[in-house]
Image (spheres, rainbow, N blue to C red):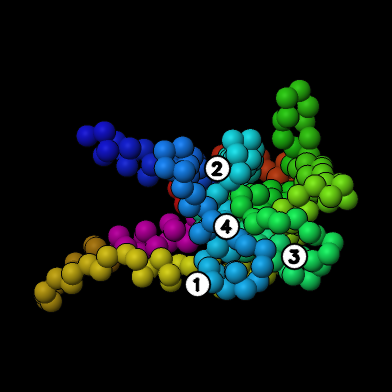
Amino acid sequence: MAQGNLQYQFKRLGISEKLIVANVLVFILEGLLLALFDVSISRWFQLPKDFFDFLVQPWSLFTYSFFHAGLGHIFWNVLMLYFTGRIFLNLFDSKRFLTVYFMGVLVGGLVFLLSYNVFPTLINQNTALIGASAGVTAVLIFICTYIPNQEVRIIFFNVKLWHIGLFFVLVDLVQIASGSNIGGRLAHLGGAFLGYFYARQLLNGLDIGEGFSNFFSSMGEWFKPREKKPPLKTVYKKSADRSTRRDKDYDKMARQKKIDAILDKISQSGYESLTKAEKDFLFKAGKEN
């Protein structure tokens, strides 16, 4: 009964919350293995700095994002993931969220690899890359670019999103200049660039993540159990059934057309230009996707 309830609660979570759960579970598992057996599994999934080591474990270009160096590391990542996810999913569906997030992870990882192999004397730290920061930064900078003038409440003040994005980018640049965690900071900037570029292209009508999204959707189909096809039967459908189906298709098209019109309004005048009814409609649509 308890297991079934947990599964039900997990299914009710949004996609960003599911990512948070996955990161926390991996962190707990890694901690338990270290404490009980003195075994670390992160070395098989972290992104190594050496290119030839990476070729031995190419999956690490994505799996590194599920491992964290400590409690503070994972705390700030999941906190940012939660708040940026709420804003993002009010505008777009979970599929696009995952696309931006994992493309940020990918680009951040590639920047890390290139930085260590192209500038070995500049970046001489003996380390590997772990953490969800590149993906989280990609989502953050995406929304800061897409709706830059949208204000959010931080303690006692309202701050525009583009101010927040600029702050985090400047922090990474300062940390690089000070020589602190250079490879990790460069990975953050790689994710930030992806988020900015993706949003700018989307505002211009081009979805640069479409191919990436379709690729991962097709991979997901490989792991779904195949349903047994029922025996062929001759079915005579009533005209009323066809009419109902047409009505549903029409409602779906009308709903999507309304969403597109609201997103166009946001791209032209900003999120704050929406009426309360439009904001409520967009919020409900994001929850249903």
In this view, 50 is above or below 157 = below
| SS assignment at label 2 | helix
Q: Earlier in the sequence, mark 4 or mark 2?
A: 4
Q: How far across and down, in percent of the image, does residue 48 sit?
A: 62, 62
> CA–CA distance between discs 4 and 2?
36 Å
* Cα separation between marks 1 and 3: 29 Å
Q: Name the residue under label 2.
A: 283
The tag earlier along the polypeptide, 1 or 4, is 4
Estimate the spatial distance between the alpha carbons at disc 1 and disc 4, rounded to whole Å. 23 Å
In the image, residue 245 above or below residue 118? above
- Residue for point 84% across, 61% down: 122
Look at discs 1 and 2 and give the one toward the viewer.
1
The disc labelled 4 sits on which kind of residue?
Answer: Gln
Residue 147 in picture, x, y percent from top left: 73, 49
Residue at screen point 55% across, 63% down: 60
Give the secondary structure at mark 3. Answer: helix
The amino acid type, in three-letter code, at marker 3 is Tyr
Spatial CA distance of label 3 from label 2 is 42 Å
From the viewer's perspective, tell me whether residue 228 is left or right of residue 22: left
- Image-quadrant location for residue 111: bottom right
Q: Residues within 10 Å of mark 3 (few under 14, many from 20)?
A: many
Q: Name the residue under label 1.
A: 215
Mark 4 sits on what residue?
46
Q: Which of marks 1 and 2 is nearer the N terminus?
A: 1
Q: Where's the N terminus, which quadrant?
A: top left
Q: Could you tell me how far apart the alpha carbons at marks 1 and 2 are, in whole angstroms?
A: 28 Å
- Judge whether residue 116 can be spotted in this image: yes
Tag 3 residue = 116
**SS class, disc 1:** helix
Q: Can you give x and y, in whole percent of width and height, for residue 243 in the image? A: 30, 64
* Residues shaded magenta: 243-256
